[in-house]
Structure formats: structure tokens, C-alpha cells
Amino acid sequence: MEKMLRNKKALAVFMLPALLLFTLVLFIPIVQSIYYSFCEYKGMTAPHYIGLDNYKALLSDKIFIIALKNSMFFLVFSCVSQLVFGLVFAAVLTNIKKGRNIFKNIIYLPCVLSSAALGLMWMFIFDSKLGINQLLEKIGVTEPPLWLTNSNGHIILPMWIIAFVALWQYVGQSMMLYMAQISGISKSLMEASYIDGCTKVQTFRYITLPLIKPMVATAMSLNAIGSLKFFDLVYNMTEGRPNHKTEVLATHLYQQGFKYFKYGYASAIGVVLLILCLLVTLFINKVVKTEQYEM
């Protein structure tokens, strides 16, 4: 193995397929999108270079501002909620023996299901004339909430509903990452803390949490990027309604690109989304400082 690692030709042969795939699937489309963002491009004609006009138009686009605000809301909510609930579930399930796999599978199951299908399911559940509202009417609630159409408040009710559905779907991913990291901690460290008189809460705070910080940073980065790219749940539950107040960057990009055929303008939104993902990842890696420990 060491000889193979020293052989540069062998390394090049093994790396070539992955490098080609990365170049064709990611690098070239990203470069094309950046170029198109500086063009007026409608797909049927050749791109026409217009400089920064698309980016200037974004600043005066009210729907883009709403979409940006909503994406930032999902970013903060997802990072905080999935960090808290993911850690709680991981800590609890790690310390139980009977039924651990059952509960772990139940919590993780939504992660492997189609977001589009789940979005449609929850749309019917929260429909103003179906699902929950039918049950509420049967128990005497004459005016049940308009779960997906209420437009009152700074953060409107449909945004909270979508955020909690996203938490329900993706918290299992964070839980599994934390459980994998916790399982790698030496049991002797835990036993030593119990011998010294620490409670389970103190052991988690002073031993487990510092040792899983690298995974916390990884999970937060994945949650942040995923929340900025939210599309399926939002589109299938509300399609940006009411009055575009639940639009996010991904749905606005989709509308501009595939409904109005403004590929240059949609590319500019995509570039903004890419920059946000990079900045957030750098910020998380900067804030969540990690140290390497022997486990």
C-alpha cells in the first residue's frame, strides 16, 4: 500500500475518474452559471453579456429580498433546532439498551423518504379544509388556523410549519452523526468520570460534548447548506404562497429559470446562493473551534 501511495502514476489513475466526474458534474456547471449570471440569456438565443445588471436587479427585486430573508430564517432555525434535538436524541439513545435500534430507525426514517412526497403529505395534513382542521372542527373549533395560508406576522405561520416539518425530516441525520461520534469515545473516560462523582449530565457536558465538537461543526455545516437549498418541502407545501411570502432562494431561482425562462437572472440567484453556502461554512468552521483529542 505504501509503495502504491508513493507511485504518482497509480495515484493519478485512481484519482482520474473522480476528477472527471467532479469536473463534468460540478466545476463546469458552476463556471457556466457564473458566466450566465453576467448575461441576458433566455435559452433559445445566445447569451448576451450585460455586466452586473442581473445583480443590480436583485437588489430591487422584492421577492428576492423575501426569499433571502426566509432562507436565512431556515438557516438559523435548522442549525439551532437540529443541533439541540440531534444532541438530545443521540445522548438519550446512546444511554439506553432496550429499544435503541427501534427508536433510532423511527427517527431516522424520514431522512430516507422523498422530500417531494413528504411535502405533499404534509400539505394535505395542514390543508385548511382537510387533515388537522377536520379533526379540530369535530371537537368544536369553529375557526381552525389557516396553517399554510396565514400571512400575518413578521415570520408568518406557514414558515414555522415548514420549518418544523424540515426539523422532523432531517433531525435523524444529525442524530446519527452525533451517535457515530459518541460511540467512538472510550468507555474508560466515561467510567472515570462516574468514579469521580460526575452525573450523566456533567459527563456529557465536560467529556462528551468537547470530544464531539468536530462532528458538531460538520453537522452544522451540512444543516446550513441544506437549509439554504430548501426546495422540495417549500414548493410542494406552499409553492411560495401566500403572495410569495414563503418563497426561498431555491424556489425563486426555479420560478425565474423554468417558468419565466430568465436563465441569466436565475444564474445570478444561484451564484448568490453558492456564495452564501461558502460564507456560512467558513463562519461555522471559524466559530466552532475544534481540538483533536485522543479517544
Image (cartoon, rainbow, N blue to C red):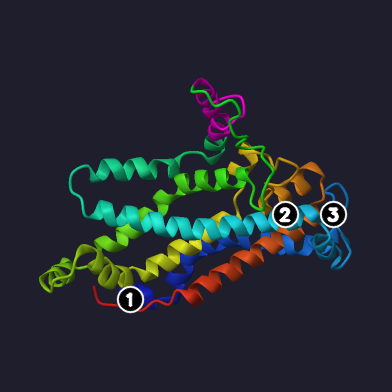
Q: SS for tag 1?
A: helix
Q: SS for tag 2?
A: helix
Q: Mark 3 highlights which residue?
A: 41
**What's the distance in space between the residues labelled 2 and 3, CA to CA?**
24 Å
Q: Position of residue 73 (x, y in %)?
A: 60, 57
Q: Position of residue 202 (x, y in %)?
A: 24, 68
User: Which amino acid type is marked by label 1?
Assistant: Lys
Q: Residue at x 31, y 75 (%)?
A: 2
Q: Which mark is residue 153?
A: none
User: Which amino acid type is marked by label 2?
Assistant: Ile
Q: Which mark is residue 3?
A: 1
Is-magenta flag for residue 179? no
Q: Mark 2 highlights which residue?
A: 66
User: Which amino acid type is marked by label 3?
Assistant: Tyr
Q: Nearer the viewer, mark 1 or mark 3?
A: 3
Q: Nearer the viewer, mark 1 or mark 2?
A: 2
**What's the distance in space between the residues labelled 1 and 3, CA to CA?**
51 Å
**What's the distance in space between the residues labelled 1 and 2, CA to CA?**
56 Å
Quarter of the image where one finds residue 133: top right
Q: Which residues are magenta?
A: 120-138
Looking at the image, tell me whether mark 1 or mark 3 is earlier in sequence order: 1
Q: Position of residue 231 (x, y in %)?
A: 62, 47
Q: Residue at x 16, y 71 (%)?
A: 193
Q: Main secondary structure of the magenta part?
A: helix
Looking at the image, tell me whether mark 1 or mark 2 is earlier in sequence order: 1
Q: SS for tag 3?
A: loop
Looking at the image, tell me whether mark 2 or mark 3 is earlier in sequence order: 3
